[in-house]
Image (cartoon, rainbow, N blue to C red):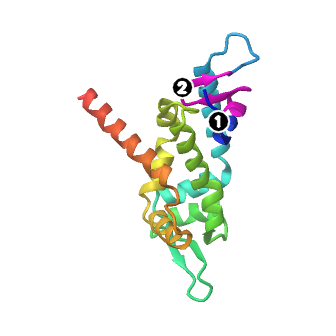
Amino acid sequence: MGVPDEDDLRAGDILGNGYRHCDGVIGLRDNRAGVGWRERKAEFAERFRLELFTPGAQKIFFLAAHGFLRFEVDATSGVGFFMIIQAQENIIEQRLRQIFGEQRSVLTFEMDDQFLAPLEEVAHYESIGVIDFEDVYRSFADFVDVAVTNKAIQEYVQWLRKQAGWKVYAQLETLHAKLKAAEKKRKKIIR
């Protein structure tokens, strides 16, 4: 038995006054009678999902899922941002104006804080066992897929990695690969 690290303590705080250790759950307590570890993990995943579905995150997801974002870097300042692309069809452009008003850009800190960073946290919590993979698959797979496959977000992540000098959002990419493998496996079973 070892001393819990910061992630262990955080996971324990989130899941019920205990901590996680590489050998399993150590000292995990839940003050509610009859609530097991699996139920607490599912509750945590659901709370996390509800927090992720903020109006800002929903708007970013909508734009990314429908290809209405283009990543650009200002030539003068070197600051990156996302332009909201004008739709070709009038009906869709009207809907975009209804949803976004005169907003024509998404700032990188909005993309990070409201969309990518929460998904990176989901990936982290799944990797250490705080959230079960099945809960992630059910609740977050579409979000993760859009975050990793959208062209504008891919360009941003590559730009950000050059700026930061390290592989930003790597856990999110790892989770995406795991989700895709599970999807492929499930499709084989259905056939």
Upstream in sequence: badge 2 or badge 1 = 1
Outermost residue toward the top in this view: 34
The image position of residue 20, as x and y in percent, is: 62, 30
Please give the residue where the numbered disc 1 appears in the rendered image. 8
Real-space Cα separation, disc 2 to disc 1, in angstroms: 12 Å
Quarter of the image with the N terminus is top right
Queried whether the magenta region covers residue 26, the answer comes back as yes
Quarter of the image with the C terminus is top left
Queried whether the magenta region covers residue 166, the answer comes back as no
The image position of residue 85, as x and y in percent, is: 51, 71
On the rendered structure, is 47 left or right of 165? Answer: right
Which residues are the magenta region? 11-27
| Mark 2 residue type | Asp
The residue depicted at 53 percent of the width and 66 percent of the height is: 93
Please give the residue where the numbered disc 2 appears in the rendered image. 23
The image position of residue 111, as x and y in percent, is: 60, 61
The image position of residue 52, as x and y in percent, is: 63, 45
Location of residue 23 (image quadrant)? top right
Which mark is drawn over residue 113? Answer: none
Outermost residue toward the bottom in this view: 76
Secondary structure of residue under mark 1 = helix
Question: Observer-nearest residue: 5 or 83?
Answer: 5
Outermost residue toward the left in this view: 191
In this picture, is 138 found above or below 97? above
For the question of whether residue 152 can be seen, the reply is yes
| Mark 1 residue type | Asp
In this picture, is 18 found above or below 87? above
The residue depicted at 58 percent of the width and 73 percent of the height is: 81
Please tell me how crowded label 2 is: few (under 14), some (14-19), or many (20+) other residues with Cα within 10 Å: few
Secondary structure of residue under mark 2 = loop
